[in-house]
Image (cartoon, helix red, strand yellow):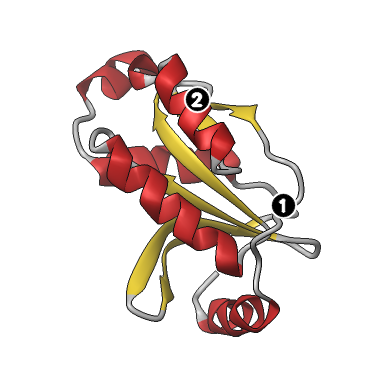
Amino acid sequence: MFGILLYRMNDEKSYQTLLAQQLKTNETNIILEAPYKHKRIDIVMIDDKQIKCIEVKINNFSELLLQAAQNLIFSDLSFIAIPERNYNLKIHNKAKNLSLGIILISNDSKTIYTPEKNRYKIQKFYDYFKQNLLRCEI
């Protein structure tokens, strides 16, 4: 039954919600639509050690890559998340070249690429974002 529901999902909000539910653990807090200045990050995972930003798209992957790359200045890691059926080597290579992680959304979503330590993080932007996250409902 769950597979049928995934097959019928056709909007980004549904994919965001599904992925957030799958990523939630006792050690990790999840924030949907987390604010940062003039934008919102689809999913933010925050724990004692790091902040991970995840941008979810079901199409328009050029915009997805741009959004996720922008998140690198204020997070420890930034990921793109797409439906597993939309994954291809071109997306993989572009994400990897931009130091972005890749999550494939399915009934059992999985991270297929995690980049090395973020070289682009700017500490004052990171601190500002972290303070804003603390004000969000977790």
Name the amino acid, label 2: His
Residue at position x 63%, y 29% from top?
A: 113
Residue 51, percent from left and from top: 66, 61
Residue of label 1: 26
The answer to whether residue 107 is visible is yes
Q: Residue at x 41, y 74 (%)?
A: 35
Discs 2/1, front: 2
Instruction: Using a 10 Å C-alpha cutoff, classify the residue at mark 1 as few (fewer than 14 neighbours), some (14 to 19) or many (20 or more).
Output: few
- Residue that appears at 53% across and 22% down: 108
Residue 48: which quarter of the image? bottom right
Image x and y of residue 82, in percent: 39, 31
Q: Is residue 9 above or below residue 101?
A: above
Query: In the image, is 7 to the left or to the right of 21?
Result: left
Please indicate whether residue 16 sits to the left or right of residue 24 in the image. Answer: left
Which element is circle 1 on?
Answer: loop
Q: Is residue 65 left or right of residue 110?
A: left
Whether pointer 2 and pointer 1 mark residues with C-beta atoms closer than 8 Å, the reply is no
Q: Is residue 43 visible?
A: no
Mark 2 or mark 1, earlier in chain = 1
Label 2, on which residue?
92
Residue that extends furthest to the front in the rendered view of this protein = 97
- Residue type at mark 1 is Asn
